Image: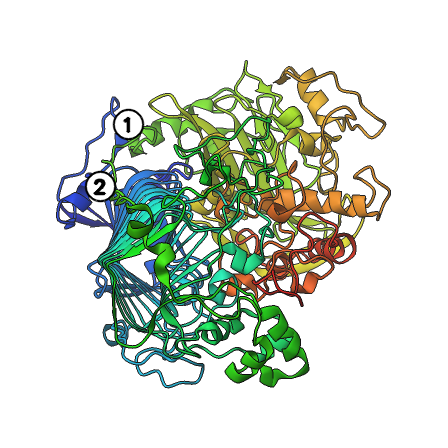
Amino acid sequence: MTTRNHLRRQVPGFLTTMVASLMLAGCLGGGDSSSPQAKENEARTTKPSTSPPVITTPGNPFSEGRTFFVEAGPNATRDMVSAMIQLRPGDTLEFACGFIELEHGLLIQATEDVTVKGCGKDETVLSFRDSDNVTGLEALNVRGITVRDLTIADSPGDAFKLKGVKWGTLLNVRAYWSGGGEPVTASNYTERLQVGCTQPPMNPGDPTPDYVPSSASGRYGIYPVESENILVDNAESVGASDAGIYVGQTNTAIIRNSRAVYNVMGFEIENVQGGEYDNNLAECNTGGFLIYDLENITQYGDTSVMLNNLARNNNTYNFAHSGLVSAVPRGTGFLTLGYDNIEIVNNTFEDHSTAAIIYASYELIDGKDKTTDKKLDPYTEGLHIHDNILRNSGYDLPPPNFEKVVLEGQVESVLPTLIGLKNITNPGKGAHIVWDGLLDDLDADCPYPVDANGDPVPQDSNGKPIHTNEHPNPACHYNAYKFDSQATRKEPQWGSCFHHNAFEGKGQPYLNFHGTQGLELALAAAEQDTSILSLEGLQSVLAGLDGAVGDTDPFVHDCQARFGKLLPPLPRVTIPPFERSGTVDPAPSQAEIDRLCSKPVRSGQVNWAATAVNCPRLDQYNLFADPGDPRSTPHDNGLPYVLNSKLFSDYATKYRVAFMPPGTRAVYRDGQGGNNLNGTLHFPNGTVLAKTFAFTDEGEGTEELVETRLLVKRTSSTGGAFWDGITYIWETDSNGKPITRLAPEGGTRAVSWHYQDHTSGQLLTGSTPAYAIPNANQCITCHSNDDQESGSAPIGPKPRNLNRAYTPESAFMGTRGQGGFPQVNQLQYWVDQGLLTNVPDLELDGRGVATNIERLPHWNLPGDSGAPAGTDADVEARLRAYLEVNCQHCHNDRGAASNTGYYLDHFRAVDAGYGICKKPTATGGGSCGRQHIVVPGQADSSIVECRLASANDPQRRMPPIARSVAHTEGVALLRQWINQVVDSDYSNGDACGNGSIFQSLPN
């Protein structure tokens, strides 16, 4: 790695003491000194910085404008990790030209104004084929990032992921998967990256001279989600098993001048408010373009414009694992589903075997009034299709998959056959524009929805509720805003307008196929005779049935003739100028670090001044009586504490201590009464939370120290509080003395364990060669939530998890050091020491548990929930405790996994949001080929069981970091809950059906 300004100077070794001391783990970042928006507006030609380094003085403790340079070779991964965790405002991470193999994902967190760049998408290729992370490049909670001029190849999951990003630009980048062909390598990448579109395989096994698609490829190529002000320009995606270029759950997004080829879905706008496709090319995908709303996620979309695009020859067979995209028929140019206000203008759709445009609703998928998410409007309205060219459509409908229909009940593949059956003008064929013909009627008895407090949810100017996932699921779909006082639909606003489109070549111009009417009888007949699943067979079954004949007259969409007016043009999307927030400081200078970390302190006193920076050694903070043993007595009234249920980390034993500056106190805040639902105690500025990971062997009488992590609540130069995370690895010097090394880059360690669990009494024994010490940016992934304090906010010390008597996790220390602290209720002890305020008078039982406040049970102690041991209530309470401490910190509506719509909050109802019969938001290996997160009574069919049980596959392993083995006991509890407790009586428990996406049909 090279740090470049006017001159290039080499950084010796990996993370030397000087470089490591510059690293801050919580609020890190970088970027060109100009804003991402300015770069986008100024011809998009960023040049390496030629400014001299900033000279720091005691009055200027910061430095910015650095460029970190990564070249191909054996040091590429460690140099990249070193750089990514140092980036601060004004910095740049630059990759050299060539093919660079990386064994770890590029993760940028909690920073602003950063740039990541290469030499060009044909010249710089970052290969993640052997990466231990699911994503190639991931930016989380970043304000202002530009990624440009490079290709990411063969990432296990997503290639470019931006989540929680405000102002993000992806410019001149490519996502590429080798698919089923020869892997892309340093010797062939110049040729392999250039993928044409001449003959897509319409069915598995067909010749495919350009590219061999594979369901083993990663999910999304370009993947901004839950973000704002996103520009994707001159990007390309090749081979994604879900969507190539996607923007989802985002406000204000533009995708332009980009190409998607050989993905399942080429381009996808999902739940976006204010989206725009402009001058893009979708070819040789299964489907070209998709604009839709997905249920049970963070927000619902409205208003997208699609113009000047070309969709051609999107006829590759569908190779997705599962999810909604797996139901897209090959040969689809454009698809919309449950999304309002779309304008499709000046586009060309040519050579699509099913349809150029499919206009559909969730009623088609779920059945009338059966969509479980009542916040989602199931119907697309305000659809304006005009001045497009539609050429050669519907000429070869994909055949049904008999095995999946008959053996698995998945009827999706029958839908194109049904369309062909109903096309009486051109039997057995599709059409240029295909509509399911489904619209809702006024539900006069459905009240306006309310929020959790019983107040009406916000509404837009048309009276439509503006729902988010924070609102409770109503009992019905409110739709009165679509109708006037005579219960007549307001049109064309809540309808659709088609006009001035040119239909050329093969294809019926228009078909309304009336939904699934008739499909039930066809499937019933097919159970007796699979030959029914042919055009002639279906015709014989459906002869004379109402709705079996499609409507080919598009007059219902002729708004000028019907209403004398058209839908007005939708506004083009404008991204506002970028400005720094000023809440993220540039990197501290080396002189400032040296000054604070070497400051002398009195015996028994913490070096509080040094906690403002990351010292090279743990002992420089003077936290413990024995600087070589973080299990020893803490200084300055440090408080050892334990948790009822803890995060699984390869069976590590943990020692936790809270240090608060003298004269300060923490404030008690619990989740009762709807306050601080998932937050911890509120700690004062300057707090240090120390957690040491050790591995105990009671047979040998040893305990190996591996790492100590600090969470420090710091104050920025502008006065804002934020949490930083710091990691120290324990080693021994040449004399066998224990020492620490600042290790924001993380690492691995071979460890073993053999001890009796203090809670369950179970003997735990095993080993792993790859215990994972997360790097600094990975730590932020778990600890950063939008509803908590900034940075790496603490997760564990919630009142309900602290409500117990203190007892160390291991008996190894006996009564020495932290082993000798009073074994009394922890909250009461903190109160008695004057270190915790605002606590209600605690009513303690004989176990040292406060019975009048919330409490999380020990997940592995039957009966600890308060319900009889082994009962359904006890199993569920303990399972929920386990999921809260292991998964909820990401799976909440403000966490790193908020875009999944799968939330495990302590006070949340166990329903679709908790995974019951919830479909995954994306396909790919992470779905394990399963259709729902939790299937009542069927752990082996549940995605969550597969994810928790997986140890080695980065696409499946969940939690994705901080463990290298599966937690056998935790998986067993999850399986017990799914198989023996969860049944169809649970809310949404009857929605799994037979695993089909088309829930409206019988098994």
Dot 1, crowdedness within 10 Å: few (<14), some or many (≥20)?
Answer: some
Residue 184, given in percent of the width and then of the height, sits at 33, 74
Residue at the spot 57% in from the left edge and 48% down from the top edge: 902
* 526 lies left or right of 342: right
Residue hosting label 1:
61
For numbered disc 1, what is the local secondary structure?
A: loop
Residue 94 seen in the figure: no
Residue 859, given in percent of the width and then of the height, sits at 73, 45
Q: Amino acid at mark 1?
A: Pro
**Which residue is nearer to you in this view: 995 or 381?**
381
Residue 604, given in percent of the width and then of the height, sits at 56, 22
**Which residue is nearer to you in this view: 201 or 648?**
201
Work out which quarter of the rendered image holds the C terminus and state it.
bottom right
Q: Amino acid at mark 2?
A: Gln
Residue 476 seen in the figure: yes
For numbered disc 2, what is the local secondary structure?
A: helix
Say which of marks 1 and 2 sits in front: 2
Residue hosting label 2:
37
Residue at the spot 52% in from the left edge and 73% down from the top edge: 413
Location of residue 208 with respect to 264 vertically, above or below: below
Location of residue 439 with respect to 273 vertically, above or below: below
Location of residue 965 with respect to 612 vertically, above or below: below
Alpha carbons under labels 1 and 2: distance apart: 28 Å
User: Which of marks 2 and 1 precedes in the sequence?
Assistant: 2
